[in-house]
Image: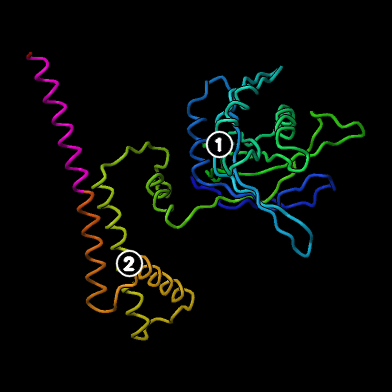
Amino acid sequence: MALNAASSALHLNLPSTSGRTPSLVTVHPSVLAQILDHQSRKPAEQPRVIGTLLGVRSSETGSTGSSSEIEIRNCFALPHVETDKEVAVDMEYHRSMMNLLGSGREVLVGWYSSSPDITPYSALIQNFFDGETGSSTPAVHLTFDTNLSQENVDSSLSVKAYVAREVGSAPKPENAVFLPIPCSVKYQLTEKAGLDLLTPNLASADSQSAQTSQPPLQTLSQSIAALTQNLTQIQSYVREVTSGSRQADPEVGRYLLEAVGRWKSENGGAAAGDDEDGAAEEGVKKGLQDTLSVSYLSALIRTQAELSARLNLLA
């Protein structure tokens, strides 16, 4: 099971309309986590869940004309009922939540579905969101394949984005074609560690087993062990290159130089030699002391609460 970081969909040139079609859609991992949480709470008889997407639109003008990019940063669940005969969406709830959450920089950009299938009802829901975003900015429909059954061959959480266009001589809301646009999952390097902790067994054979949360000290110990292993591999590679037993790879060298430069900048540009090593070691010690202090205070509060409860029983 893996996140499909980039869509392989063919980007088609859409018919000319008054709206500006996005050239790229990026999704923050926290949005996918919220969709998965919404999917896990849905009734068994409901085929999918839907919700509203919030994000930021950015425009740029190039040699081929104007284009826009959409960064999806947030979302919220939207109550709806979907049967074989009808679909009902709580529009008042949507507008109330938009008044609450849409007052900042993030604006309405579209809606999501926890199913990869585009049904006839999808066109009706899309028509509602197109009306909410306005004619100049078409709404984006994000599909998230949460089905991890045997039918899902590559066991991937596929993420795709679409925009809709009405077709026919007499266009109607239910007569629309969904055209794919490029979509990718975007995260910072500092956020990758959190994703690795949330998905620790993706590469294992038993990827369907549930994972329980670990204590902070155990998580810190595992992170340090993984870091130590990576540093050992780097040292082995550098020794082999300097001894001439292995051919140097310029790309690996650039990555190592970038990593060392980032470490120096994050530690305030410490001086070379013993001063730099001492500053780095001092930073690690302070972080460990903070973790131990939090763990000790948590245990102390828990003990005090248990003692207070027992004294109340004796009173």
Look at 17% across and 33% down and name the residue there: 301
The residue that mark 2 highlights is 267
Main secondary structure along the magenta-highlighted residues: helix
The residue that mark 1 highlights is 75
Q: Earlier in the sequence, mark 2 or mark 1?
A: 1
Q: Amino acid at mark 2?
A: Asn
**Quarter-wise, where is residue 143 in the image?**
top right
Q: Residues within 10 Å of mark 2 (few under 14, many from 20)?
A: few
Q: Position of residue 219 (x, y in %)?
A: 28, 48
Task: Give the structural element (helix, strand or loop) at label 1.
Answer: strand
Is 152 left or right of 65, judged from the image as shown? left
Look at 69% across and 19% down and name the residue there: 84
Region rendered in magenta: 292-314
Is 128 left or right of 49, judged from the image as shown? right
Q: Position of residue 24 (x, y in %)?
A: 66, 52
Q: Amino acid at mark 1?
A: Cys
Q: Position of residue 264 (x, y in %)?
A: 35, 70
Which disc is residue 172 wearing? none
**Quarter-wise, where is residue 306 in the image?**
top left
Q: Residue placed farthest to the right in the image?
A: 169
User: Residues under labels 2 and 1: Cα distance?
Assistant: 35 Å
Query: Is label 2 in contact with label 1 (beta carbons under 8 Å)?
Result: no
Is 6 left or right of 125, judged from the image as shown? left
